[in-house]
Amino acid sequence: MNHTLHAAGLGLHRGWAEFGLALRSIQDQAFYLIMAAAVVGYLWINRDNRIEGTDLLLPQFAMPGILGGMIAFTLILGPAGQLAQEREDGTLLRMRAIPRGITAYYVGQMLQHILTVLPMLLVILIPSALIFDGIMPTTARGWFTIVWVLVLGMLATLPIGMVLGSLMPSPQKVIVWGMLPTGALIGISGLLLPIQQLWTWVQHIAQVFPMYWLGLGMRSAFLPDDVAGVLEIAGTWRTWQTVAVLAAWTIVGTLITPAVLRRMTRRQSGSTVAAAREAAATQGVR
């Protein structure tokens, strides 16, 4: 127990330090600003468009889906790419040498990537609240819903990215084989358009994964209750089902991911890391 708590403390320290470096990174700051400009610009261009069958303007409907999609995309591909890179440069091999080092690595990744999402949300929500009327929740219940959906949604989706990164043979493969399925799942999860517009069998597939429930929870926070009867599958927000599914993905991910990482690092050695570095350097020269 003491080793586990010590490892968790090391992980929290590492995750906070990595987040601090990211905040000071010019590239990350530019990414946040470009992302915010793109989202707010899209909402501004479509500010007068209405969603068919409702009184909602497109910015009101699109905001929770945009936030849910960005969270899922960032917390799957971000950890997947970083894990694949750190496996290649020997970071994971060094962490394995520390007692409960994989646990520390897992905790650090969780904290780092969850914190990284927060500035991205703020640079979108703050200008949107100032520019568009009726786009933000107006009740304490709505803001409370945002908090618990964000927490459960991030904890549910991030382990998917770490497992994906552990399965990819190289960071370059993450871009190809990670981006396509992640984008497809986000596309069918009702984050970008009402899910009832999709085929029934696609709706069933979407409800297996946490992205759909993350989007549903966000919509329940931002949109009026009567919208659920028009746009949602069951005609309600299904709050308890959202809690149950996201919690189940969180628990399963928390149990499985460290085991997957330990199994992956057992196949590593100094020679495999050196070979991976040499292969990466060769590809870079080409």
Image (cartoon, rainbow, N blue to C red):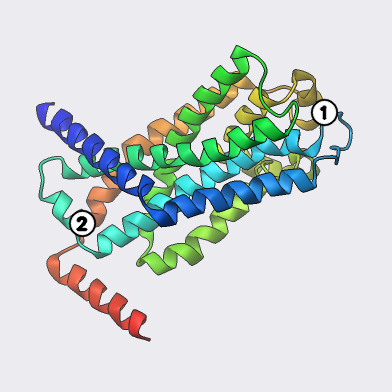
Nearest the viewer among 66 and 168 is: 66
* Kind of residue indicated by mark 1: Val
Foreground mark, 1 or 2, reads 2
* Kind of residue indicated by mark 2: Thr
> 10 Å neighbourhood of mark 2: few (<14), some, or many (≥20)?
some
Residue found at x 21% / y 40%: 104
Residue 146 spot, x, y in % from top left: 56, 25
Residue assigned mark 2: 91
- 123 w.r.t. 24: above or below: above
**Left or right: 108 as drawn, with respect to 28:** left
State which tag comes first along the sequence, 1 or 2.
Answer: 2
> Disc 1, disc 2: CB below 8 Å?
no
> 10 Å neighbourhood of mark 1: few (<14), some, or many (≥20)?
some
Residue 220 spot, x, y in % from top left: 66, 24
Quarter of image, res 229: top right
Residue 73 spot, x, y in % from top left: 52, 49
Residue 81 spot, x, y in % from top left: 39, 58
**Left or right: 87 as drawn, with respect to 186:** left
Residue assigned mark 1: 230
